Every structure is written in structure tokens, then in C-alpha cells.
Image: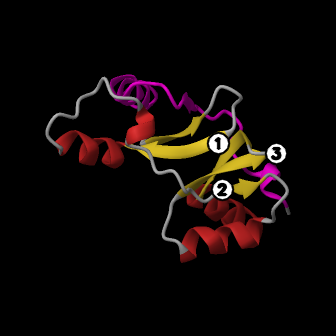
Amino acid sequence: MSVSKIMTYHVISINIKTSIGQALDIMEKNKINGVPVVDDNKNLMGMIVKSDIYRFLIDEGHNKGYPVELAMTKNVFSVNKDEDIYSIGKKLRENNIIAMPVVDDNKVVGIISIEDILDYFLENTFK
């Protein structure tokens, strides 16, 4: 089964030029820990999570006005919308990550989490 069957489609992403302060506000408002970062064409450029921001802000001279591009993780794991959930679950587990952006032609179309995969297996194993 492909990830497109169980992923979360409503994903909040932010532009690479968004300020760190705005990114924190978006995460707080939506009660999320991180978001994909995209360019003006909606191509995936990275991910930013609260811990990335806090580590960035600790450095002297850094403030919430800087763009997320300076604090984000650039080389992120992502999955294609047609990948099967077994390989995605393995990728999440082997790399000790809890969620990955789902892309179609490098455009973010959703997000898949370890919880999504666990829910799928629980629903389909214990019926």
C-alpha cells in the first residue's frame, strides 16, 4: 500500500524566507513541532523544528528576525507519494525520525509520521 493512502494531506509549510519568529508563531498556533520549508515554487528545501530554532537562537547575535533558511535542516529525508508504507516505516525507524514530508515532483503534498504507520498496522492487524 502506498503512503498516499495514510498520509496527512493538510500539511503546513513555510517559505524559506519566513522569519524564525514567524515560524515559531505558526508552530505554536497550530500546536506542531516542525514544518517543511519550501521555496517560492513550493519545492522542498528542508525542515525546521523548534529545537533547530532554539539551538540557533542560543548563538550570540542571532534573533527571531533571521530567515528560517539559516536554522533549518537542509538535507532531510522525504518520501515519494507512491512509496509503500513498509519501506517508509523502515526508513523512519532506521533514521530515528518521527515524520517526513511526502513529495510529488519535489513539491510537498503531505506528511507521514510514525504514528500514521502505527495506526495503519494496528487497524489492519487486529481486525
The residue identified by callout 1 is 44
Q: What's the residue at 39%, 22% (across, down)?
A: 22
Q: What's the residue at 82%, 45% (across, down)?
A: 105
The residue identified by callout 3 is 105
Mark earlier in primary sequence (1, 2):
1
Tell whether label 2 touches label 1 (CB within 8 Å).
Answer: yes
Mark earlier in primary sequence (3, 2):
2
C-alpha span from label 1 to label 3: 10 Å
User: In terms of secondary structure, where does tag 3 sit?
Assistant: loop
Q: Residues within 10 Å of mark 3 (few under 14, many from 20)?
A: few
User: In terms of secondary structure, where does tag 2 sit?
Assistant: loop
- State which quarter of the image contains the N terminus: bottom right
x and y percentages locating residue 38 in the rendered image: 61, 35
Based on the displayed image, in which of its 4 quarters is residue 44 positioned? Answer: top right
Q: Amino acid at mark 3?
A: Asp
Question: Does residue 90 appear to the left or right of 33 in the view shown?
Answer: right
The residue identified by callout 2 is 78
